[in-house]
Amino acid sequence: MKSNALIEIKEASGFLPAIVQSNVNIRSKPSKEGKKLGLLQGGRSIRAEFLIDSDWARIQFNGDRAYVHQSALIKQLYKADIGYSMNSNNSTVFSMSGWHYSYLPGSYFLNYQSSLHGQASYGPINGSGYASIGSHLYKVDYAKRDIYLATGHESGNRTYYTPYLAIPTKTELQVFVLPTFTSSDSNSLLVDGDTLIYEGKSYSSCCDYESFKLRFNLEDLSYEGTQLYYDSDSQMDTAPLEKRTLSLVVKKIPLVKSH
């Protein structure tokens, strides 16, 4: 994808031996009487040391030792992980975590956590192959609000990439699924004022595709777009079969505050 409006987040976490299956408090010592230091959100991949003869696991938190209850964690042994995170001054974290088993497709989660507004997770974003292939997280270069774009992938006869536009508000995390593209496409994304413009090709098979143009209003989160469909029996770019309105799949996940 060609773009001068995306800032890639490249803080990779490397091999991680545990997955957080539910929200859990981070504490200063392995006890419920330990001081609460923060919240670990479900869906994330972390590095944890499972303590022997204990219900607690030790983790690194802000450079120091901290503890979470083992019941919230799933210990993983054979997998490759990659994770990204972005921190801002208001203690907001947005991350993308992925893992892969040799016998299952890879999976990815988009995780949002804010000390002001709460937390939410979107996923899994399914793909195949190792998590390091085709998984990218970007921050959109836009000053008025936080906007993120993540890409997942799916392999078949060709490898397809699906971009996810994730926008947190004060009450929810809104995720818009953008048209799929392949590595041979020349899709482009740019920001013009308050409008995000995304255009290119969306393949439905090896040869059939739709050319599309999407204009997304970054202030009110409305959009408009069109598609022109071509198949292998038509004259491709010179003879579109039909023009239709582009409709995006949208998921709205309420933000939940920790108690």
Image: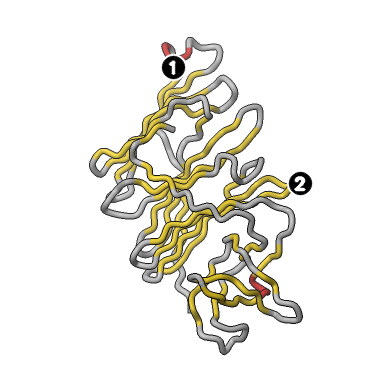
Disc sitting over residue 103 in the figure: 2
- Residue 64 shows up from this direction: yes
Question: Is residue 141 shown left or right of residue 20?
Answer: left
Kind of residue at disc 1: Pro
Is 258 or 74 nearer to us in this picture?
74
Residue under the point 62% across and 64% down: 47
Q: Are marks 1 and 2 in contact (CB under 8 Å)?
A: no
Q: Front-most of 131 and 174? A: 131
The residue furthest front is: 63
Q: Position of residue 207 (x, y in %)?
A: 57, 19
Q: Residue at x 54, y 67 (%)?
A: 41
- Name the image quarter holding residue 105: top right
Residue 76: give x, y in percent of width and height.
71, 60
User: Mark 2 packing: few (<14 Cα in 10 Å), some, or many (20+)?
Assistant: few
- Confirm whether residue 215 shows in the render: no
Q: Is residue 77 left or right of residue 99?
A: right
* Position in image of residue 104 (x %, y %): 72, 47
Question: Residue 2 lies in what quarter of the image?
Answer: top left
Q: Is residue 251 above or below residue 232?
A: below
Image side of residue 54 versus residue 209, left or right: right
Q: Nearer the viewer, mark 1 or mark 2?
A: 2
| 156 with respect to 135 (left or right) | right
Label whose residue precedes the other's in the sequence (1 or 2)? 2
| Element under disc 1 | loop
Q: Determine the residue positioned at 54% across, 76% down.
A: 26
Q: Can you say whether 164 is above or below 49 in the image?
A: above
| Residue 72 in the image: above or below residue 10 | below
Callout 2: SS = loop
Residue under circle 1?
A: 240
Is 167 situated above or below 180? below
Q: Amino acid at mark 2?
A: Tyr
